Amino acid sequence: MTATVEQIESWIVDVPTIRPHKLSMTTMGCQSLVIVRLTRSDGICGIGEATTIGGLSYGVESPEAISSAITHYLTPLLKGQPADNLNALTARMNGAIKGNTFAKSAIETALLDAQGKALGLPVSALLGGALQTALPVLWTLASGDTAKDIAEGEKLLAEGRHRAFKLKIGARELATDLRHTRAIVEALGDRASIRVDVNQAWDAATGAKGCRELAAMGVDLIEQPVSAHDNAALVRLSQQIETAILADEAVATAYDGYQLAQQGFTRRLRAENRQSRGAEQRAGAGPRRAGGRDWPVRRHHAGRHRRDRGFSARLVDAAAAVGYRDVRPAVAERRYCQRAAHLCRRSGGAAANAGPWRRAG
């Protein structure tokens, strides 16, 4: 007898960061995770997760909205449905509910987790098999203080933990951000790869000037320097700047990647499964390679990064269709959060009671 979806529960968990995490659009004192537990009629439970950053400053779904969508819309839609046909359930979600891709991704992950447990297989096997067992990890230097960031990077290098760092810039004047980046490149760049993430903070003119300066000082990669809606500027930067330009927020679906490649983008694309609803993109697609290399896509699940091979393949196919051949591995990234002795208050990240705080979904 086929197991059905019996119950879906969600909680919001606020995990304090080890220090304030300064982005171009906000400063984070904690990371809010929406944790999902899906229970099947055979008693098997699957765990899923949806994570966004900075409330509504990064994307269109907040943790509270994700949890609400799961509780009030997605759960009633899926209860009683066969739990082992992921594509059918994804089509049901997409047919009845527009957007809400983070919420759908959390449920998809829980369904995959439960199916893997039922079959005695890792989720990677359900997606076609793991390509490797480990990935190098980026550490984000985002205190906003140049000396502190350099000291943090030196410590991590000395411990042998990381050899690649990403700087969060864009919140300050361009000249200030460039001085900050140059100092870190000079201090750490001979022993580590330095990348920057602007999180869409620059307009086209600032992006052109900033990217030229960053390339000249030896930055290895520049992530989403301009608005996700300004594909024209992103394409120009990819064609004019020697340093790799990474499209992140601009690529939420396979079609976004196709459009960007069709317009002439010549660098790197990254799509996050939490935004793109991986199962929908995977349907009918098997693992492929383009330009002799696999194109990894970052997949978030409970603090680990997995490759969504099918969605990756769809992006590769779209790019190859218009002659995009520079398909290179991206380094998975993870910001380490430790369970601090005190819980941050959501208003300002100040310490409160012992945590993390689990809030009812």
Image (cartoon, rainbow, N blue to C red):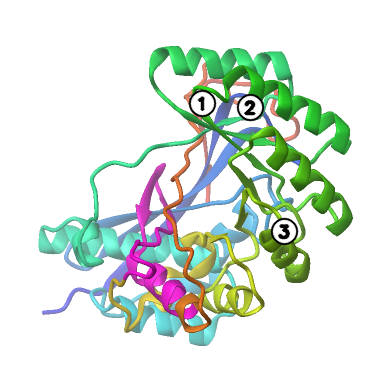
Spatial CA distance of label 2 from label 3 is 43 Å
71 or 323: nearer the eye?
323
Residue at label 3? 240
Under mark 2, the amino acid is Cys
Count neighbours of disc 2 (C-alpha within 10 A) and say few if under 14, some if 14 to 19, many if 20 or more: many
Whether residue 327 is visible, yes or no, is yes
Residue at label 1? 355
At x 80% / y 32%, what residue is drawn? 177
131 or 194: nearer the eye?
194
Local SS, label 1: loop
At x 44% / y 12%, what residue is drawn? 158
Under mark 3, the amino acid is Gln
The percent coordinates of residue 6 (x first, y second) are: 30, 69
Which of disc 1 and disc 3 is earlier in sequence?
Answer: 3
Q: Is residue 249 above or below residue 333?
A: below
The percent coordinates of residue 1 (x first, y second) are: 11, 79
Task: State the image quarter where residue 111 is shown.
Answer: bottom left
Q: Is residue 255 above or below residue 59?
A: below
Local SS, label 3: helix
Local SS, label 2: loop
The percent coordinates of residue 67 (x first, y second) are: 55, 58
91 or 245: nearer the eye?
245
Q: Nearer the viewer, mark 3 or mark 1?
A: 3
Under mark 1, the amino acid is Gly
Over which residues does the magenta segment extend?
A: 289-318
The percent coordinates of residue 235 (x first, y second) are: 70, 67
- Locate residue 332 relative to residue 237 in the image: left or right: left
Q: Are marks 1 and 2 in contact (CB under 8 Å)?
A: yes
Whether residue 71 is visible, yes or no, is no
